Amino acid sequence: MSFQKSLLFLTIYAATVTTQTADLGPGTNSEAQGATAQVTPGSGPNGSEDWINSGIESDGWEAPFLSWDSLIKIDRETFYANAGKPCKQYDWAFQQAGDKNGIDPVFLAFIAMQESSCNPPTPGLMQVACSNHPDGQCTNDVARNTDAGAAFLRLQLDANNRNAIKVMGNYDGKAHGMPQNLDYLQQTLNGWVLGLNPYGDENWIGQYHCSGDCSRGHVC
């Protein structure tokens, strides 16, 4: 390979790597293993994806502990001004459900973007399983669906000692071994909560890009 071709290859490689990182400047979460200041496909300020997904490729998912209150995140207005813009119209619902269930409304907006891109089809904005609605009936009513999502989140926070990884994994259904988006936790904890869009410009966030059964170590 000529020097010119080698230089061109290295330039293209460097450009590719650069487009798959985001340096947001908030530092790293001291409680999170493998945390990096930059968000990369497999890491970020709230921990590495390998750590967050502990056990997925062996005996099944075993959520490590990461305090909900330690999460590095952006505020609601910043989120609405950027990646979470589609959710701004539902801020009233997030505030209402958040106040009722003792949850920072911004977390409901993060989840809504991950679950439905804030474009609510049935089963609604928060994509809550029918069995987790108070009356057992799915609905795309924004207020009722958001309240159901917030109530389920509250239940998970109380049942799991505010372990952010366990709480978000359970919201995704990982505890039940259902076919999952194996990048869900990386996209949420190192994507949406930091104002990045894993479904848009930052679609490089995550290492799996597939679904799998988290209960028996089967990946894709």
Image (tube, rainbow, N blue to C red):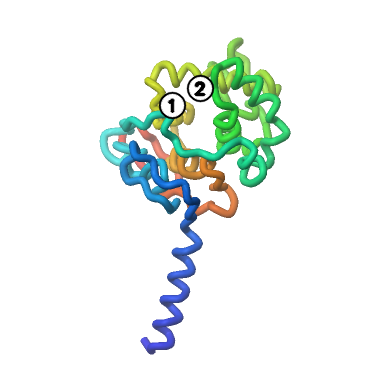
Please state which amino acid type lies under the numbered disc 2: Leu
Callouts 2 and 1 close, C-beta under 8 Å: yes
> Which corner quadrant holds the C terminus?
top left
Residue 162 x/y as whole percent: 41, 23
**In the depicted view, which residue is nearer to us: 174 or 27?**
27
Residue 124 x/y as whole percent: 65, 27
**Image quadrant assignment for residue 53:** top left
Residue 146 x/y as whole percent: 63, 23
Residue 186 x/y as whole percent: 44, 42
Left or right, residue 123 beside residue 23: right
Q: Which residue is mark 1?
A: 167
Report the disc number at residue 205: none
Residue at 38% in and 40% down: 29
Residue at 70% in and 26% down: 92
Q: Which residue is mark 2?
A: 153
Q: Earlier in the sequence, mark 2 or mark 1?
A: 2
Farthest residue to the right: give it.
89
Farthest residue to the front: give it.
26
Left or right, residue 20 beside residue 116: left
Please state which amino acid type lies under the numbered disc 1: Val
Marks 2 and 1 sit apart, C-alpha to C-alpha, by: 7 Å
Q: Secondary structure at mark 2?
A: helix
